Image: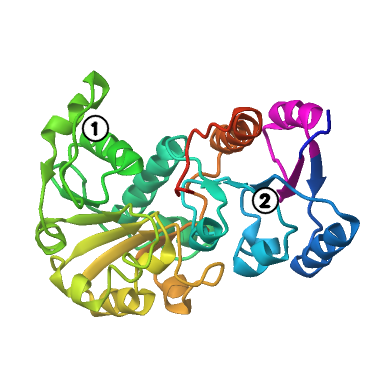
Amino acid sequence: MTKENILFIGTVRHAKAQETALAAKYNIHYAAPTRKELLEQLENAKREGITFKALYRGFASHYTLGRVDEQLLNTLPSGLELIGSVGAGYDFVDAEAATRNKQWVTNTPGVVDDATADATILLLLSTLRHQYQVEYNMRHGLPHKPRIGRDPTNMTLGIVGMGGIGKAVAKRAQALGMKIVYHNRRPITITGDDEAFLKEVTYLPTLDALLSTSDVVSIHVPLSPETRHLIRADQFSTMKAGSYFLNTSRGPVVDEEALVQALASGHIAGAGLDVFEHEPKVHPELLKNMDVALMPHLGAFTVETITKMEALTMENIDLFLSSGVLLTPVNHVN
């Protein structure tokens, strides 16, 4: 029986046992190290009659190989049916183009929730306590001029997007004594005892209502045409004077220049950011601002979480090739 071919774009960092098991059942072809070489590799595959039934998009592979976009999909030999993408967000895959091509796309929701929520709380506390400036001054031998911080206890945390990550943030923030409000397209449904803590959160039907009542606003929505620049100058002006802003979702959800201006005016007291509008580039004013805590998109960057993401992606590929089943599809193919 002929083995199906799988194209791996990017490397498997930690789920090596699952990679070995997959390689025993299928032929794995590894992508060339640059975008230019990858496109040449795919043209050669077409000339040699090699086809790929599935594509594995590895963690952070877009930095070296670019997005799985329409150009790449059109360069691939015909016959691709599945794109398995490592990550909860799937904006690094052109899902609309894939759907037009009748190609399924999967992501890895759920397994990133805890690590991303932990990163959000890290940024929250760092921002409230001016941790970056304090540490910077100590490491550089600068005069120590303490800036008094804020306690999260009794603050209101407004969560925009109460999905898995938003819920995990809410649970952690409640342990800090914060009051939780949230805005979604619709109120959430509590599904079991493990979500009993959600009985204490309050749904607000409009984004403006959340922004105007929250001491801290935390963004947890996927990037889509509808959410691009969801938070811009008008939204920052609606936020309470002296409030704080967190984003661990996707950079383009926020108009970064508007955030810079809101911080410069003092209307926003501080920000904690793991994602940026034009990453890996970061707005120079954010880099200079001691009231901003920064991370270079490392919210899910733990051994345990990357292992789970990679394993789930390969499980999707294996199940699809062996039985046509998908665990976490993000699109629908007729």
Left or right: where 15 falls relative to 123? right
Residue topped by disc 1: 175
Q: CA distance from mark 1 to mark 2?
A: 46 Å
Helix, strand or loop at disc 1? helix
Can you give x and y, in whole percent of width and height, for residue 262 in the image?
26, 76
Q: Relative to 175, is 62 above or below?
A: below
Residue occupying image coordinates x 70% and y 45%: 53
Nearer to me, 66 or 295: 66
Nearer to me, 43 or 100: 100
Q: Which residues are magenta?
A: 5-27
Residue topped by disc 2: 80
Identity, as a three-letter code, of the amino acid under mark 2: Leu
Identity, as a three-letter code, of the amino acid under mark 1: Ala
Residue 173, image quadrant: top left
Q: Relative to 184, is 314 above or below?
A: above
Left or right: where 207 falls relative to 76? left
